[in-house]
């Protein structure tokens, strides 16, 4: 007999990249609880993409970045908590890692008023006081982020499969970008995307270096270069274009999240910093060359077939680090355009 179990709430109030890395955890929880409605509380940034996952039944937007900038958003948070409190959940699962005591307390205050038979997460920095089923404090060390989150999903009765990470887009956006892919469909050129942005300045390789690599790829492969970037990153793409002799298609600041996922799915290669678009490429099986600065690629690198990616980084003494700003980012400054070009050629011309 088919019956409905009490719903499950997954909490992952992080960015697009983390959402995508968590996709196999969402799926595992649905696999193990097929008769339960899966609710997901995620950031407003990730909300448009989260809404496309077929194994998530309800998506709630949490204004986490907005709250950091304007405390007035606490009113929206309280309204959201009031609505979630009306639901009698079977499980509430926090998939994301705990960084600090303050972060643990803030998240705990979100968990505290919500109703559930069981609350699950990483037992670290005091967050264990707010939950009854605890993942080990060290769960996010020495393994990929996607695998660590899946271990928490297993505590919620999740069942693994071998599908890896996934991302979906709204198919209604496809027709407006057909013009970009006409020459690609005729086999006449390579489409190479360049994403010079990133969550922090110290994750961003210099635009002039990207421009040099783009010029070489254009010459070698008769490539069409597509510049990507979110709101506020238009200047980075403009600087790349300014330093290129050949024209590029500049889409920075012009794409919705659904547009971005679809466009990346059609590229022959994405050259990018450590960023959300890097994880989108990995999820849609687009080859990717990723430039890493302060973060550890063993934990945050592309989660896909090793044949589909190359990582470029410098293992300097001060990395990995969590600084938001760095006056001398040696980890990025020591990466040369020539080696980035070499990794791109390895992907585009295997063997």
Image (tube, grey):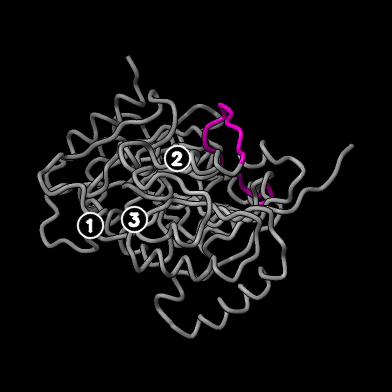
Residue placed at 52% from the left, 69% from the top? 110
The majority secondary structure of the magenta stretch comes to loop
Give x and y (percent) for residue 85: 67, 70
Q: CA distance from mark 1 to mark 3?
A: 10 Å
Query: Which mark is drawn over residue 202?
Result: 1
- Mark toward the start of the polypeptide (1 vs 3): 3
| 19 and 344: which is toward the camera | 19
- Mark toward the start of the polypeptide (2 vs 1): 2
Give x and y (percent) for residue 351: 32, 14
Proximity of marks 1 and 3: CB atoms separated by less than 8 Å: no
Q: Seen in the image, is 196 located left or right of residue 32?
A: left
Residue placed at 85% from the left, 44% from the top? 3
Give x and y (percent) for residue 328: 10, 57
Q: CA distance from mark 3 to mark 2?
A: 22 Å
Give x and y (percent) for residue 171: 67, 46
Pointer 2: residues within 10 angstroms few (<14), some, or many (20+)?
A: many
For the magenta stretch, what is the residue range? 157-172
Query: Which mark is drawn over residue 108?
Result: none
Q: Inspect the magenta stretch and tell me whether residue 166 lies in it.
A: yes
- Viewer-side label of 3, 2: 2
Q: CA distance from mark 2 to mark 1?
A: 23 Å
SS assignment at label 1 = helix
- Placement of the N terminus among the 4 image quadrants: top right
Please identify the residue farthest to the top as the structure is shown.
351
Pointer 1: residues within 10 angstroms few (<14), some, or many (20+)?
A: many
Report which residue position mark 3 lands on: 197
Report which residue position mark 2 lands on: 146
Q: Quadrant of residue 193?
A: top left
- Mark toward the start of the polypeptide (3 vs 2): 2
């Amino acid at each position: 007999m088919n019956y409905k179990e009490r719903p499950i709430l997954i909490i992952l109030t992080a960015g697009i990249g983390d959402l995508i890395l968590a996709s196999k955890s969402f799926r595992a929880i649905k696999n193990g609880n097929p008769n339960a409605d899966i609710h997901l509380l995620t950031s407003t940034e990730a909300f448009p993409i989260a809404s496309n996952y077929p194994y998530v039944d309800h998506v709630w937007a949490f204004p986490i970045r907005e709250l950091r900038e304007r405390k007035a958003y606490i009113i929206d948070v309280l309204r959201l908590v009031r609505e979630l409190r009306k639901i009698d959940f079977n499980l509430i699962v926090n998939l994301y890692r705990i960084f600090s005591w303050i972060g643990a307390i803030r998240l705990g205050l979100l968990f505290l008023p919500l109703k559930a038979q069981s609350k699950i997460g990483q037992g670290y920095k005091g967050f264990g006081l707010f939950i009854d089923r605890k993942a080990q404090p060290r769960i996010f060390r020495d393994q990929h982020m996607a695998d660590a989150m899946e271990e928490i999903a297993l505590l919620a009765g999740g069942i693994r499969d071998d599908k890896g990470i996934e991302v979906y887009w709204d198919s209604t956006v496809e027709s407006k970008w057909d013009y970009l892919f006409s020459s690609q469909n005729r086999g006449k050129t390579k489409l190479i995307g360049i994403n010079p942005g990133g969550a922090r300045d110290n994750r961003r390789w210099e635009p002039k270096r990207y421009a040099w690599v783009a010029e070489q790829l254009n010459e070698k492969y008769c490539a069409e270069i597509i510049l990507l970037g979110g709101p506020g990153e238009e200047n980075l793409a403009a600087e790349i274009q300014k330093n290129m002799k050949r024209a590029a298609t500049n889409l920075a600041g012009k794409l919705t999240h659904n547009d971005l996922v679809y466009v990346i799915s059609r590229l022959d290669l994405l050259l990018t910093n450590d960023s959300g678009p890097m994880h989108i490429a990995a999820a849609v099986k687009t080859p990717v060359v990723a430039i890493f600065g302060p973060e550890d690629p063993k934990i945050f690198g592309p989660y896909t077939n090793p044949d589909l990616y190359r990582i470029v980084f410098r293992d300097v003494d001060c990395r990995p680090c969590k600084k938001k700003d760095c006056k001398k980012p040696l980890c990025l400054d020591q990466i040369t355009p020539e080696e980035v070009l070499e990794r791109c050629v390895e992907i585009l011309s295997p063997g």
